[in-house]
Amino acid sequence: MNEQQRKEQAQIKQDNHPTDVKSGKDNIDRIKSTTSDEMIAKYFQANYQPPDINKARKRRKEDVQFHYDFSIPEDMANIGKGKKFLIRTYGCQMNEHDTEVMAGILTEMGYESTSDTNDADIILLNTCAIRENAENKVFGEIGHLKPLKLEKPDLILGVCGCMSQEESVVNRIMKKHQHVDLIFGTHNIHRLPHLVKDAMFSKAQVVEVWSKEGDIIENLPKVRNGKIKAWVNIMYGCDKFCTYCIVPMTRGKERSRRPEDIIQEVRHLAAQGYKEVTLLGQNVNAYGKDFGDMEYTFGDLMDDMHKIDIPRVRFTTSHPRDFDDHLVEVLAKGGNLLDHIHLPVQSGSSEVLKRMNRKYTREDYLELVRKIKKAIPNATLTTDIIVGFPNETEEQFEETMTLVEEVGFEAAYTFIYSPREGTPAARKKDDVPEEVKKQRLYRLNELVNKQSGESMKSYENKTVTVLVEGESKKDPDVLAGYTEKNKLVNFKGPKSSIGHIVEVKITEAKTWSLNGEMVEKTVEVN
């Protein structure tokens, strides 16, 4: 991306319309009669293109460039020496991984990480825009940090992530939260050194939000959360445009990393001793569909992962529409390709799925499940479900309940529908009372909990393999880790087993976790 393109994509600018030019006396009189809020709104208003589904659909025509030359500018290489940063992360695994990248960049600038807000010289809130509740939490945190900013004027307070890609959110921050120094989005994380420099030396808010997604920047530094499991981005963005979802507007079009870059990263992680990687994307099944120079799909990538000497490979999130037969065939090879598959269905009603623009029917989904279970008989399926989508009838909700039973999901993330500004669903009139939505969620959760409890019960007296991640949060004498099927196991064992895969015999099953005893291996002497 050249400088001219960058300038065109920077979406904040002062309003310099010629009609605003008046005489000096007129200007003074006008300023005196203008409130501070009006002043901010007029002169620092964000001039974005609001999220537009139709325009967003056309973005696929634009080429994505790959860059391998990231470096910290010389004048910023040690600017953080003796200073500390704190990043609070909200939302999905993609955000968690973005935080690892930002932490890597700040570390290379000389900063050290801290978990204490009072010690921090930079605080970044990496935000989520999926649900209204997530936004409310962030605005609450922005308010809580205001006294600290007043106490420490040199503190740099920044808001980044998906919320920053929303026009209304940025306007609200600029108008009502002037103690925020820095606002940037999801497409320009690699420009963090420049943004921090601007925030340090500028008296005004620094706002750089690109409405058009950026190119793919490789070789970004990362400070990973732990040395056992790692996130690996394989693609960015989403082109599915589900009517309830803001992601295509906050994360941009689907764009895939080159397979050689992903394979090299995973091999490097394996060489460092990592035991598990999770391949990340808003829709991993669409990986490679944007390549114009070769035929290489997600199934091909998973086949190459199968050949790498790392014990466990997971992926998230899948879209049922793009989960093809080749991928099922590759996953059936097993080995380090785990048989836990998260497959969001969202609704069991074909009519609701149509209104959601999911592009598959109830029957399509059940047929995909049948194929998966035939090829991978022991596959564990989990899912996402939204209840109370606009105008969902009782009969349509019951279709979701029967689908949950038929598939036999062992866990599910369940939500009451939350309208997001800028999405088609938010414009739909909703005749489902809030109390009815809550009752439906309660009934659905009861069913999911019952199925989870039954699946957990089947593990009693069985031996499972557990990747030990550390001490239990509730008891330092108890270790905790996950099975291949992503079941949480708590057990007593030596601290030396942390970071290793061990065998544990299950002694007690709970709804969402298992208790067990570590199996001591004996070595035969001939």
Image (spheres, rainbow, N blue to C red):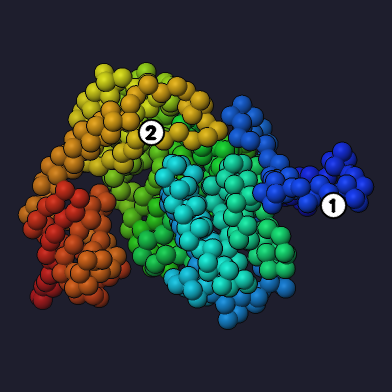
As helix, strand or loop, the secondary structure at mark 2 comes to: loop
Q: CA distance from mark 2 to mark 1?
A: 49 Å
Q: Amino acid at mark 2?
A: Tyr
Total residue callouts: 2
According to the image, label 1 marks what residue?
28
Q: Residue at x 27, y 51 (%)?
A: 486
In the rendered image, the vertical position of residue 380 relative to residue 123, given as above or below:
above
Query: For this rendering, which residue is in front, 439 or 25?
Result: 25
Let me know if residue 500 appears in the view: no
Position of residue 512 measured from the top left corner of the image (x, y, whole percent): 20, 50
**Furthest-bottom residue in this view:** 82
Residue 356 image-quadrant placement: top left
Q: Residue at x 25, y 30 (%)?
A: 440
Residue 399 image-quadrant placement: top left
Position of residue 113 measured from the top left corner of the image (x, y, whole percent): 49, 72
According to the image, label 2 marks what residue?
417
Q: Residue at x 74, y 47 (%)?
A: 34
In the rendered image, the vertical position of residue 200 relative to residue 16, given as above or below:
below
As helix, strand or loop, the secondary structure at mark 1 comes to: helix
- Tell me if 173 is positioned left or right of 119 in this view: right
Position of residue 92 measured from the top left corner of the image (x, y, whole percent): 43, 49
Closer to the camera: disc 2 or disc 1?
1
